[in-house]
Image (spheres, helix red, strand yellow):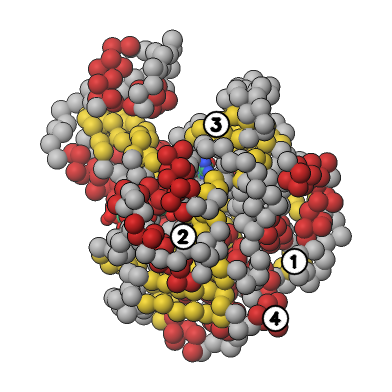
Amino acid sequence: MGGYRQLFDASVADAGEFWAQAADAVTWTRAPQRILDDSNPPFYRWFPDAELNTCANALDRHIAERGDQAALIYDSPVTGSQRVYTYRELLDETARFAGALRNLGVGKGDRVVLYMPMIPEAVVAMLACARLGAVHSVVFGGFAAHELATRIDDAEPIVVVSASCGVEPTRVVQYKPMLDHALELASHKPDACVIVQRDKRACDLVDGRDIDWSAAMADAVPADPVPVAATDPLYVLYTSGTTGKPKGIVRDNGGHAVALLWSMRHIYDIDPGDVFWAASDVGWVVGHSYIVYGPLLAGSTTVLYEGKPIGTPDPGAFWRVVSEHGVKALFTAPTAIRAIRKEDPQALHADRYDLSSLKYLFQAGERLDPDTYAWASAKLGVPVVDHWWQTETGWAIAANPMGVEHLPLKAGSPTVPMPGYDVQILRVDGSRCEPNEEGAICISLPLPPGTLPTLWGDDARYEASYLCEHPGYYLTGDGGYLDEDGYLFVMGRIDDVINVAGHRLSTGSIEAVLAGHPAVAECAVIGVADEIKGQVPRGFVVLKSGASAEGLAEELVAAVREEIGAVACFRLVDVVPALPKTRSGKILRKTMRGIAHGKDEPVPSTIEDPAVLDTLRPILQG
Ligand code: COA
Ligand code: AMP
């Protein structure tokens, strides 16, 4: 493993030296003298004495050489529009919007929540926050008011930036009423909301609180980048944990810039001027790292696509974008490829386009099943690179580093750990597994730059969630194994997190909604296999005595949509007489999951009443 092995070994042998070299790619206002602060384990900080501005690294520093190069290509089949922003134009818009935020009182360290569809203003707003040293927190548009309110209460923003609506293929999603409702629910009230009025549907503005984006821009003077400590937060991104309360993943400025720049070159093989397209959403970590920051830090061109893999207008949509904009690397979730394959099994739509620019298809967000891998490899004729990461890490833990060397691919494996990630598979007792033995995938501390330093305002929860189970290690929450060649196989979550169409959801938060219904005595939600989305949630509820099941399923489906959002894709719910439990009252979700997946699941010795499981078995298998 020539180049890769050398790099990986160097990163483990002397992490300080490895990342000091990588840090040279960043433009610092104060260059790092110290690389790693390890004085307070298990908390580690990268580049503790350095200063920079992430927005200046993403925009200003490219102007001299590539001011007229496309920075961002907005391609929106759902509205029938396209627009190209050069680096100069994107900088002008961003500096002006930073000025607008400053007029509203936003400064270094203040939070700004963004609830935005996939429009250029979302990217501008993120970069504008970074310019001021403010901390953005983007909430995915598919989440409903209650979820938005929870995040607003945790982040306590001064300003919220949103839009009148989002445009889905079959409907216009009205964001503004959702925002208004969230602000009624939230205890924290921002001083102002800046609203982009979209042509598709404008919205009413609340006097004294809401400001039209254009008016805010018209009044603004462009703002200069504010230097911040490398360890200052750039953003907080909430993700699902095992409880209903989302976790605020913190990303710092310095480590993030260093790691993303390293990844663009070494993992994605992207040089300045190349076109990179992550077909995700700015509301997810993939959108943060690889629609916005990574490609712009690298001086390449990013594509912002407001559309779907199918239906906008057909399963050739991705191939059109690749050929029209000369995309070199496409990054998407396997679910998108499965959706395309289902509608166009022969990939006839791919033949309609010139795909010669495409060199790689990167896959992440969920396990890349060998069938999808084989289909995409055969139809596209380029390396299909599975890589594994999480909101927490912000960049790939395991990948095949295309800019270093093309390691032989193994179907079902995201290949090998990336530099800085000393991946170990642990048994329950903390000992290390043998090759091919499945266990908990853990990473020896410290984690590399770019990964979470903590959870927003909650060091204790950070420790409890990730660091306590196996002292000295970060617990990823995924299970899997390393084979005899050091290839990693990620087999799925070992907690109650599920992955629906590449979107991470907590079954606990869905259970909380079901349990809130007056007819429900108790409930369990598990992830079950779905042909396209990988997994979908399935609920099982037990009625309170005397309660009626009539119309209940519809009410529960509507309640989850109302409280969590359409993104939960919650449609399956069964009323059952009882749930299988241990003698101490713990619901046997893992056993239920196993049976639903057709596994020969042993009946746990701790079960309270085996007859309950026997009754449930045909329902689970049905
Ligand atoms: N704003 C508002 N609503 C949204 C939304 C957004 N940004 N994104 C999705 N939704 C809604 C959808 O309209 C849909 O609502 P519906 O129940 O009324 O139809 C619901 O949330 C589920 O959306 P989605 O998961 O996109 O399912 P779909 O059936 O519309 O499309 C796929 C199926 C496979 C095409 C789609 O899931 C997809 O493109 N997946 C790729 C996911 C991806 O890239 N993930 C990024 C991780 S790397
Ligand atoms: P998220 O934080 O939303 O990016 O989700 C992270 C989770 O998605 C991981 O913990 C895995 O369970 C899953 N995941 C992401 N990428 C992969 C992959 N390439 N293979 C298997 N699982 C993946």
Query: CB of residue at label 4: within 8 Å of ligand 1?
Result: no
> What residue is shown at x 21% (from left), y 35% (from top)?
519
Q: For numbered disc 2, what is the local secondary structure?
A: loop
> Which quadrant is the C terminus positioned in?
top left
Between 544 and 310, the residue placed more toward the observer is: 310
Nearest the viewer among 196 and 151 is 196
Q: Which mark is residue 65?
A: 4
Q: Which residue occupies 47% across, 63% down?
A: 355
Is tag 1's residue or tag 4's residue first in the polypeptide sequence? 1
Residue at screen point 41% across, 14% down:
602
Mark 2–mark 4 distance (CA, rounded to whole Å): 27 Å
* Mark 3, secondary structure of its residue: strand
Residue 586 pos. (x, y %): 42, 22
Q: Is mark 2 within 8 Å of ligand 1?
A: yes
Ligand 1 shows up in the quarter that is bottom left
User: Which element is circle 4 on?
Assistant: helix
Of residues 151 and 278, the one drawn nearer to the viewer in this rendering:
278
Q: Residue furthest right?
A: 33
Q: In this figure, which residue is indicated by the disc labeled 2?
A: 279
> Mark 4: few, some, or many residues within 10 Å (few <14, many ≥20)?
few
- Label 1: which secondary element: loop
- Disc 1 marks which residue? 26
Of callouts 2 and 4, the N-terminal one = 4
Residue to which mark 3 is pinned: 479
Nearer the observer, disc 2 or disc 1? 2
Q: What amino acid type is highlighted by mark number 4?
A: Glu
Which badge, 1 or 3, comes first in the chain's sequence? Answer: 1
